[in-house]
């Protein structure tokens, strides 16, 4: 099965923030571009094999299954809807950060 992969604004913002950090704060614009390319290539692999990825720590806090794709210690958090054939990348975080928990509105 081939899935459609959607990125939420939240996830896209976190990816952009990380690329900006690498480019500006770390002073590595070339590496930021390479990192961003790896992230986008990794997102594309979710079209075919999303369930190869482990269940994320966030899964314990939500009623839907949350999986994670690890790219150089940066985690993309996503769900898989087999019925609709859609993978939705919900959010992202560095692997050293604490898991993302629901906001009061999400509970």
Image (cartoon, grey):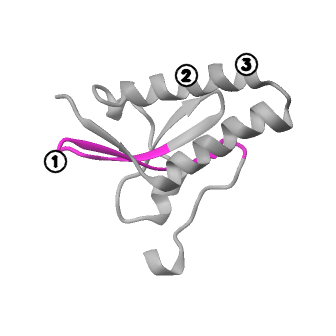
Give the CA distance from mark 2 to mark 1: 27 Å
Read off the residue under disc 1.
84
Place of residue 107 in the rendered image (x, y in percent of width and height, measured from the top left): 44, 77
Quadrant for residue 44, please give it. Answer: top left
Residues in magenta?
Answer: 77-96
Q: Which mark is residue 17?
A: none
Within 10 Å of disc 1 (Cα), the crowding (few <14, some 14-19, many 20+) is few
- Is 58 one of the magenta-colored residues? no
Query: CB atoms at circles 3 and 2 under 8 Å apart?
Result: no
Give the CA distance from mark 3 to mark 1: 38 Å
Quadrant for residue 33, please give it. Answer: top right
Q: Is residue 97 left or right of residue 7?
A: right
The residue nearer to you, when weighing 39 against 66, is 39
Query: CB atoms at circles 3 and 1 under 8 Å apart?
Result: no
Identify the secondary structure beneath mark 3. Answer: helix
The residue nearer to you, when weighing 95 against 23, is 23
Place of residue 2 in the rendered image (x, y in percent of width and height, measured from the top left): 20, 29
- Which quarter of the figure is the N terminus placed in? top left
Q: Is residue 66 left or right of residue 95?
A: left
Within 10 Å of disc 3 (Cα), the crowding (few <14, some 14-19, many 20+) is few
Quadrant for residue 22, please give it. Answer: top right
Identify the secondary structure beneath mark 1. Answer: loop
Read off the residue under disc 3.
30
Image point (44%, 74%), residue name: 106
- Is 92 one of the magenta-colored residues? yes
Q: Earlier in the sequence, mark 3 or mark 2?
A: 3
The residue nearer to you, when weighing 33 against 49, is 33
Relative to 21, does residue 104 appear above or below in the rendering?
below
Give the CA distance from mark 3 to mark 2: 13 Å
| Disc number lying in front (3 or 2) | 3
């Amino acid at each position: 099965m081939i899935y459609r992969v959607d990125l939420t604004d939240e996830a896209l913002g976190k990816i952009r923030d990380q690329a900006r950090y690498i480019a500006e704060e770390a002073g590595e614009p070339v590496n930021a571009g390479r990192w961003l390319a790896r992230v986008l290539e990794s997102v594309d692999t979710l079209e075919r094999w999303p369930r190869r990825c482990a269940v994320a720590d966030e899964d314990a806090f939500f009623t839907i299954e949350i999986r994670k794709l690890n790219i150089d210690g940066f985690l993309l958090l996503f769900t898989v809807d087999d019925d609709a054939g859609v993978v939705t990348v919900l959010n992202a975080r560095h692997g050293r950060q604490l898991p993302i928990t629901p906001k009061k509105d999400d509970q």
